[in-house]
Amino acid sequence: MRLRFALPLLLFLVLVAVSGLALYQTSHGKRDPQQLPSVLLNKPVPTVEIPLLQQGGSVFSLAEYRGQTVLVNFFASWCLPCRLEMPLLGSLANEGIPIIGIAYKDRAADTEQFLAEFGNPFHAIGVDTDGRIGLEWGAYGIPETFLVDQSGLVQWRHAGVVDQAVLETIRPMLP
Amino acid sequence: MITEISYFLLLLALAASLMQTVLPLAGYWRGQGSLMQWASPMQLIGSGAVILAFGGLIQAFVLSDFSLALVAQHSHSMKPMIYKISGVWGNHEGSLLLWVVVLGIYGAVFAWCRNPMVEKSLILMVHGGISAAFLGFALFTSNPFAKLAYPPEEGLGLNPVLQDIGLALHPPMLYLGYVGLAMAFACAVAGLIQGRIDQDWARRIRPWVLVAWSCLTTGIVLGSWWAYYELGWGGWWFWDPVENASLMPWFVATALLHSVIMVEKRGCAQSWAVLLAILGFSLSLIGTFIVRSGLLTSVHSFAADPSRGVYILGILVLAIGLPLVLYMINGPKLQSRQSIAVFSREAALIINNFLLLSATAVVLLGTFYPLGLEMVNGAKISVGPPFFDSTVLPIMAFGVLGMVTGSVLAWKRGWRGVARRVLLLAAIAGVAAILVGVGLGYREVAPLASLGLVVWLLVGIGADIYSRLHSAQRLAQGLPQLGMWLGHLGIALLMMGALGEAIGQSETIVRARAGDTIPLGDETLKFTEVKTVRVDNYVSLQVTLELYDASGQQIATLIPSRRHYPAERQETTEAAIRSTLLGDHYAVLGDGDPDAGFTLRLYYKPLLPWLWIGGVVMVLGGLVSLVMRRNKP
């Protein structure tokens, strides 16, 4: 009879235990709530044709990169954290890894100014003015980076700034 | 200077809340009424101090005082005044302070009301404990009055998506709802301490539950409406963790609303009502604070910080754990000895409670399951709309069946003669509606079932009203039911809006230039012009679309636009919506230029405005119940 009245407390304690454990892991760097899985993992990239920033609105195709491992990076001139990762992306580009930038909800003039100011690590720059491509890719907030393998499948996704630590985790996947 | 005073006022409020908790508790322990009487004045001092401090913060935003870190990060001198003010609660620190302010307002109103001294002091004691915990949280982990050593010339602005009237009002309404449940929670805990939950208790708690429920409903509807017209996706509910966080307390508050009536009218289900009052506020706490703790992530969440998370978890353990321990010890004393007939309003209300609580449990599970799974095997998943649609909606369907059944049954004795006729009529109408639907060619189960349920509910309420009000002397008996009828009618209208959109929505995506004509079924849309307009803090690109009906008569002009905010370097889309009682025309401007043409997304959403009308009618029901409360048992 008493058990009925203790039940809410027991359920609550379970909830607390799970939350406490998660919090412990978060504060000890073992868990990152920003790190979200992509529903696209091991699936083909959603948008293949992407309008280009330059060359008067023509499109380029991600299919052109079949056979190569590419990074797809959503960025914008109004996004402050995006500035932080440009140097690292630049050094990756120098290693010969093609990086495709997608300017998310940004104006062309602002994007160009941003690239002039903080460097342009991109092999090609697509535009996503109304956020539709971001929606299809399930972009969560930017900056956000996807790794697409040689057969055009999404292998990894990271929401937030790509820093040295993040880079180490994907090193094995890069050529 | 003002900010220093405000900070000091928060410290004062913290001290007052601590006194408000300790003194009545000590007084109750030692049987000293004189100590307990301190609760009310302490509450008034604390509330006053918090409200003044909040005024200080508003002033800093209005004057664009960028020496405050909060103002520098979230405001901008170019912003319109109303959004400078709403910017106060558009961030973690400010919204936390708003939460404490609302808590203070409720507490002050309660301290002002006439209530028996012992009960009142115990309730304020609990209330003071909550205030103290959150003032401590605000002061020690998220101080809104933190200063910058080198104030910047200009602020970083507020996200333009958040510069919107719907969003300016949404959080305060939601907080009024969440925190209103704190009052019910305090009553429940005080009742448990005394071991007495009776009809007086129910009468004391009921207005607070009604106020909280009405505000919560308003807040949720406002948030949904904002998502509908501002996000430009045409959706109105996304099962996002933050939306779920507001839905769970709503379910529980609805259950509480119904079970408090049982305690008041029949003196049964006391331990159940107490548990619901505790759960309602617990879920509000979880809802408000879990998204700030770094545990769950959401598009709506503020910047997460694990050190805050530890403090939050500590508060939750105390605020929820202690009452549940008390419930375990004193709950068994509250058992009622009333027997309940199978066909009676009591039984129907218990089933209603069970369904609402199941829905809450499912949403809670869907929200926390990813976290639990991650702890077990490290997998990261997210639970999306398909899960919620296929679990919550069937539960709600049974709830709708019960809404008619419960309201026609009488207390205790069960079947009234007329109840059978009302139910039969409603059932026939519902089945007939489904058959008509099948006849029109619809084959999917969910929309057909919803159609049947909407008709069942509308006819059931109508017949119930008719059966109770068709003679003058029954009018007086029927009037106290008005709130219930409105509440249930609101649900029916809301379902009608959702259903119309679900089965009748049409979407057209075109690329068009000025001068083009776009056919939309019987109607046509004429793209007449493109222009750029400068408004205070943004530049707006607008296209004008003229809508003509089948006979060539112009019926509306739609002007969807895109705004560019130079200070934030951000773009927002503003959908153009033309609402009639029959449905919404919804146009969104995509990208493009005048030469190559613009992408346009055009929707027609039949009956959708009834969603909002339904929400308003529900809130009206809550307010009517509040005003027309019967004072005698």
Image (spheres, rainbow, N blue to C red):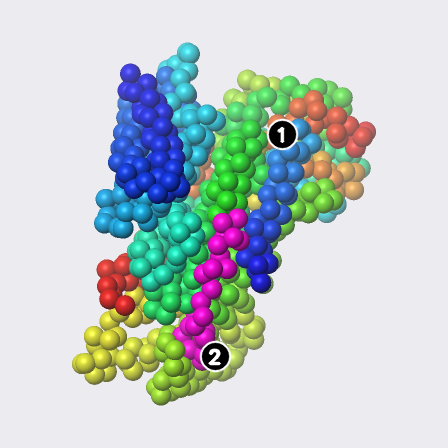
Residue drawn at (51%, 65%) of the image: B354
Q: Is residue B375 visible?
A: yes
| In magenta stretch: residue B203 | no
In front: B199, or B185? B199
- Indicate the amino acid at tag 1: Ser
Asked whether B386 or B297 is in front, the reply is B297
Residue extending farthest top: B150
The quarter holding residue B551 reads bottom left
Vertical placement of residue B11 versus B618, above or below: above
Does B331 lie within the magenta span? yes
In the rendered view of the protein, which quadrant contains the C terminus of chain B? Answer: bottom left
Quarter-wise, where is residue B49 in the image?
top left
Quadrant of res A72: top right
Q: Which image quarter is the N terminus of chain B in?
A: top left
Look at 46% across and 25% down and name the residue there.
B140
Bounds of the magenta segment: B325-349
Horizontal relation, residue B366 to residue B567: left or right: right
Label 2: which secondary element: loop
Of circles 2 and 1, which is in front?
A: 2
Residue that mark 1 sits on: A27
Residue B488: percent from the left, percent from the top?
A: 37, 68
**Residue toward you, B162 or B184:** B184
Q: Main secondary structure of the magenta part?
A: helix
* x and y, in percent, of residue B58 in the image: 30, 29
Image position of B212 with respect to B427: above or below: above
Q: Which residue is mark 2?
A: B342
Label 1's element?
A: helix
Q: Position of residue B199 (x, y in %)?
A: 33, 62
The subunit carrying tag 2 is B
Q: CA distance from mark 2 to mark 1?
A: 53 Å
**Residue type pointed to by label 2:** Val
Q: Residue B308 location in percent, x, y?
A: 52, 31
